[in-house]
Image (cartoon, grey):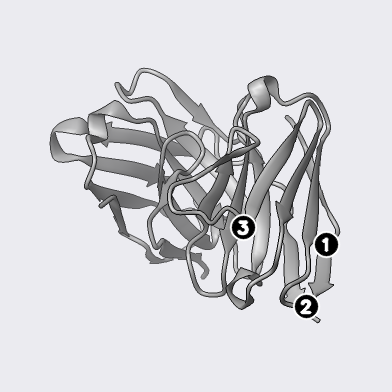
Amino acid sequence: EIVLTQSPGTLSLSPGERATLSCRASQSVSSSYLNWHQQKPGQAPRLLIYGASSRATGIPDRFSGSGSGTDFTLTISRLEPEDFAVYYCQQYGSSPYTFGQGTKLEIK
Amino acid sequence: QVQLVESGGGLVKPGGSLRLSCAASGFTFSDYYMSWIRQAPGKGLEWVSCISSSGNTIYYADSVKGRFTISRDNAKNSLFLQMNSLRAEDTAVYYCARGRYGAYWGQGTLVTVSS
């Protein structure tokens, strides 16, 4: 089973700042089958990034993903108030399709 | 637009059974893998199971293998999760999602396992 470790656990930033979230895998994620999902309180998650770097439909271009192998990053270039949420990485290269434990992005 | 609507959640005693359903619309259901993903109260996301478009390929998390069964009815655009031998640790919101990785998610249905 591939274990995904996200850091930091909580990130405190202000609107307008840049956010960098990390996801490290215990073994290489095949074909960069790595996603990022966003979840706001009381809502279902929604897909932000798939294939490590491709934005899902309707996702603003301030969100970008990068990385390969075992190290992946989600970057939000300039934080908007609606971006404060919990972010999860997920690998779907090999079953079981595991999630990271999440990074909570909170307003400073 | 893509819509996924889960149903069938509720309160069940440990050792009991429950069958979840997911009604899909807005896309060609028979073209896509489908998945179940759950979230225990106040916790993170846990992938549970997925099934190929034809139903011939199925994967389970170790935590549910042998107790849960995923299935689909392409004629009725529906996904199912039969949950047997339920435990307290199965208490969670269960989400239906399109694809192997959740390109689209439903709003979830709450399953509570408690005596």
Protein chain holding label 2:
A
SS class of the residue under badge 3? helix
**Mark 3, other Cα within 10 Å: few <14 / some 14–19 / many ≥20:** few
What is the spatial separation of the Cα atoms under label 3 and label 2, in whole angstroms? 37 Å
Vertical arrangement, residue B59 with respect to residue A19, above or below:
above
- Name the residue at 58% across, 44% down: A49
What is the spatial separation of the Cα atoms under label 2 and label 1, in whole angstroms? 17 Å
Camera-nearest residue between B18 and A69: A69
- Name the residue at 44% across, 53% down: A58
Q: Are marks 2 and 1 in contact (CB under 8 Å)?
A: no
Q: Residue furthest bottom?
A: A108
Work out whether mark 2 precedes mark 1 in sequence or the reverse, and give the earlier one. Answer: 1
Q: Residue furthest top?
A: B56
Which one is closest to the eye, mark 1 or mark 3? 1
Residue B38 relative to residue A19: left or right: left
* Amino acid at the residue labelled 2: Ser
Is circle 2 on the same chain as circle 1? yes
- Name the residue at 66% across, 53% down: A88
Protein chain holding label 3:
B
Camera-nearest residue between B12 and A54: A54
Is circle 1 on the same chain as circle 3? no
Numbered mark located on residue B89 in the image: 3
SS class of the residue under badge 2? loop
Q: Are marks 3 and 2 in contact (CB under 8 Å)?
A: no
**Mark 1, other Cα within 10 Å: few <14 / some 14–19 / many ≥20:** some
* Amino acid at the residue labelled 3: Glu
Q: Quadrant of residue A10?
A: bottom right
Residue A3 image point, x, y percent: 77, 37
SS class of the residue under badge 1? loop
Q: Quadrant of residue A81?
A: bottom right
Residue A2 image point, x, y percent: 74, 31
Numbered mark located on residue A14 in the image: 2
